Amino acid sequence: MTELTPRREATVARLIDAAIEQFAARGIDATSVEQLCEAAGFSRGAFYSNFASKDDLCAAMIQQFQDRLLAELGTMVAEIPAEVEASDQLVQILDKITRIISPTPQMTLTLLEIKLRAQRNPELYQRLVDADERTRPEQIAFIDALVNSLDIELILPTDQVLRIFEALFFYGAHGDPTANFRQVMAPLALTLVKQHQA
């Protein structure tokens, strides 16, 4: 997508918000463009002036989601007091990270819908791969900078740690109402920190 004007950016944001709600409720295939537009309060023209298809919307949704996470994570570390002990810093940071990246049930379902759709759609699949390749270096750099600032060491390569938490992102998608991503992430993250002998 090209750079957007503020008005068009607001339109795109409303369409994406409507898509998250509608795709989670109905599925992507069962949701028509008309239903998306009605939920967002726009005409079909507003949709097609911004997206060529629902697949185009899905790709834009992934891009917006990744960009938002990177932007919020990029400013998060600065809020942790420098004088706090490293172990306490790690706990605070993990809590902040889980607050930022914890998905809503609707977002979890929608992202799963998009991933399943991409498995049957080579063009959409490639767009998701491209989006992943675009943001992965920044995600890895964020984790590496965090690890270095806390003077800790991970037991696995950063890329593998990132993949683990990407899988954990969908922890609550199996329908168990007691499943809580935030309750699981911090304890798991702590097990990935190498313990040095005194």
Image (cartoon, grey):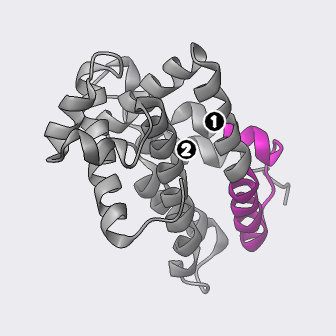
Which residue lies at the image location 46% right of the left edge and 58% below the top edge?
Answer: 95
Q: Quadrant of residue 93?
A: bottom right
Give the amino acid at mark 1. Arg
Q: Quadrant of residue 34?
A: top left
Q: Can you say whether 11 is above or below 186 in the image?
A: below
Q: Percent from the top left, x then y, of residue 53?
A: 42, 32
Q: Percent from the top left, x then y, of residue 33?
A: 27, 30
Q: Percent from the top left, x then y, of residue 66?
A: 54, 51
Which residue lies at the image location 63% right of the left edge and 26% below the top edge?
Answer: 123
Tell me which segment is drawn in magenta: 136-163
Q: Can you say whether 117 is above or below 84 in the image?
A: above
Asked which secondary structure carries label 2, the reply is: helix
Q: Can you say whether 166 is above or below 139 in the image?
A: above
Task: Kindly identify which numbered label has been placed on residue 127.
Answer: 1
Which residue lies at the image location 53% right of the left edge and 53% below the top edge?
Answer: 1
Magenta part, dominant SS: helix
Q: Is residue 169 left or right of residue 27?
A: right
